[in-house]
């Protein structure tokens, strides 16, 4: 699989923004311990949070279109 710079850039920007939002939401507003208490498992909360960051980032990478170079230079 060939990685494209533009796609990686968009996915990285999305990752940073989404990760910052989840950190603010979980640590600041909801409280991590509250989530652990309500779901009952530290591992379940950690896995869920990781998937909430990784899966949308992969989706952004996959759905970002890459511009095709249509200029052919012939000599």
Image: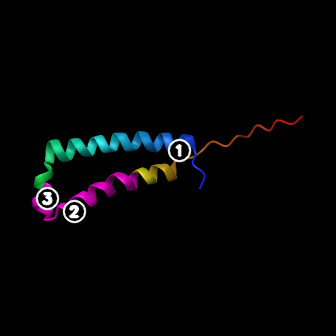
Identify whether 8 is placed above or below 47: above
User: For the view shown, which residue lies furthest in the right direction?
Assistant: 75
**Colour setting:** rainbow
Residue 17's tag is: none
Answer with mark 3 or mark 2, whichever residue precedes in sequence: 3
Locate residue 39: give its quadrant: bottom left
Q: Secondary structure at mark 3?
A: helix
Labels 3 & 2 near each other (Cβ < 8 A): no
Residue 7's tag is: 1
Answer with mark 1 or mark 2, whichever residue precedes in sequence: 1
Where is residue 28 drawn, in percent x and y? Answer: 16, 41
The residue that mark 3 highlights is 36
Answer with mark 3 or mark 1, whichever residue precedes in sequence: 1
The residue that mark 2 highlights is 43
Distance from the alpha carbon under mark 3 to that under mark 2: 9 Å
Where is residue 13 drawn, in percent x and y? Answer: 42, 39
The quarter in which the C terminus is drawn is top right
How packed is label 1: few (under 14 Cα within 10 Å), some, or many (20 or more)? some
**Mark 1 or mark 2, whichever is nearer to me:** 2
How packed is label 3: few (under 14 Cα within 10 Å), some, or many (20 or more)? some
User: Which residues make up the magenta segment?
Assistant: 35-56
Q: As rendered, which of 18 and 36 lies closer to the eye?
A: 36
Where is residue 21 drawn, in percent x and y? Answer: 27, 42
Locate residue 72: give its quadrant: top right
Distance from the alpha carbon under mark 1 to that under mark 2: 31 Å
**Mark 3 or mark 2, whichever is nearer to me:** 2
Task: Inspect the magenta stretch and tell me whether residue 51 lies in it.
Answer: yes
The quarter in which the N terminus is drawn is bottom right
Magenta stretch secondary structure, dominant:
helix
Q: Residue at x 15, y 51 (%)?
A: 32
Q: Residue at x 44, y 53 (%)?
A: 58
Q: Secondary structure at mark 2?
A: helix
């Amino acid at each position: 699989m060939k990685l494209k710079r533009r796609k990686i850039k968009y996915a990285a920007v999305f990752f940073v923004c989404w990760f910052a939002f989840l950190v603010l939401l979980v640590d600041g507003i909801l409280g991590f311990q509250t989530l652990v208490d309500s779901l009952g498992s530290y591992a379940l909360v950690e896995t869920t949070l990781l998937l909430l960051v990784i899966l949308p980032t992969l989706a952004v990478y996959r759905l970002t279109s890459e511009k095709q170079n249509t200029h052919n230079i012939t000599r």
